[in-house]
Every structure is written in structure tokens, then in C-alpha cells.
Image: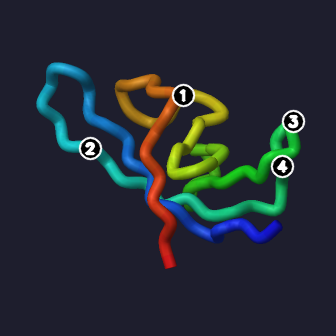
Amino acid sequence: MEHIERYAVTIPGAPGAHAEPRVVVVSLTHTTGPDGRPVYTDDTGTFLVYVNGGVAEPLADPPGPTSMRCLHAVPLP
């Protein structure tokens, strides 16, 4: 199965702070998670996610003041 190489993942601002969301670009790595799904990471290597059907699931808390577990992911060319 072929995987999309890159996604733009939207991380919402802090609730109630009227902060703009951040967009983080993640790229496919050559590793898989414990359940066998491919892992994507940002350019710093600290933000790790699974991506499935337009939803990014962080492997740990995403950067920023929120701890959202389902983030919007858009495929990039």
C-alpha cells in the first residue's frame, strides 16, 4: 500500500484565547508505530503522528497549549 508523503496538520489555538491555529507539515518516516501504522513527523522530529482519512493522531501531546487527540490533516503534493 502506498502512503501519502506529506500532510499539513492544523493545531488549534488555545481555547478561549482567540489564538490563530498553527499548521505543521509532517512527512512520512521509515518507521511504524506499535500497531504497524506508518509514522509521520515534522522537520524537528518532535511532533509524531499517525494519519488516517484526513485525521492526524499525535503519538504524544502536540506542540502548543492544547492536547487535542484528533487533528485535521490535508495531503500535500
Q: Do the residues labelled 1 and 2 touch (CB within 8 Å)?
A: no
Judge by depth and name the residue closer to the eye, 73 or 17: 73
Of circles 1 and 3, the one toward us is 3
- Give the class, few, some or many, for how many residues have Cα within 10 Å of label 4's Cα (few <14, many ≥20): few
The amino acid type of the residue labelled 1 equals Asp
Which residue in the protein does label 4 denote? 32
Give residue 19's position: percent from left, percent from top.
17, 36
Which residue in the protein does label 2 denote? 21
Which residue in the protein does label 1 denote? 61
The amino acid type of the residue labelled 2 equals Pro
Residue drawn at point x = 19 percent, y = 43 percent: 20
Q: Do the residues labelled 4 and 3 touch (CB within 8 Å)?
A: no
- For marks 2 and 4, the one nearer the N-term is 2
Which residue in the protein does label 3 denote? 34
Give residue 24's position: percent from left, percent from top.
43, 54
Seen in the image, is 55 located left or right of residue 32?
Answer: left
- For marks 2 and 3, the one nearer the N-term is 2
Colour style of the rendered protein structure:
rainbow
- For marks 1 and 2, the one nearer the N-term is 2
Quadrant of the frame with the N terminus: bottom right
Residue 52: mark? none
Q: Do the residues labelled 4 and 1 touch (CB within 8 Å)?
A: no
User: How far is disc 1 from disc 3 in space, using C-alphas?
Assistant: 17 Å
Residue 64: image quadrant is: top left
- For marks 4 and 1, the one nearer the N-term is 4
- For marks 1 and 3, the one nearer the N-term is 3
The amino acid type of the residue labelled 3 equals Pro
Residue drawn at point x = 45 percent, y = 36 percent: 63
Of circles 4 and 1, the one toward us is 4
User: How far is disc 2 from disc 3 in space, using C-alphas?
Assistant: 29 Å
The amino acid type of the residue labelled 4 equals Thr
User: How far is disc 4 from disc 1 in space, using C-alphas?
Assistant: 18 Å
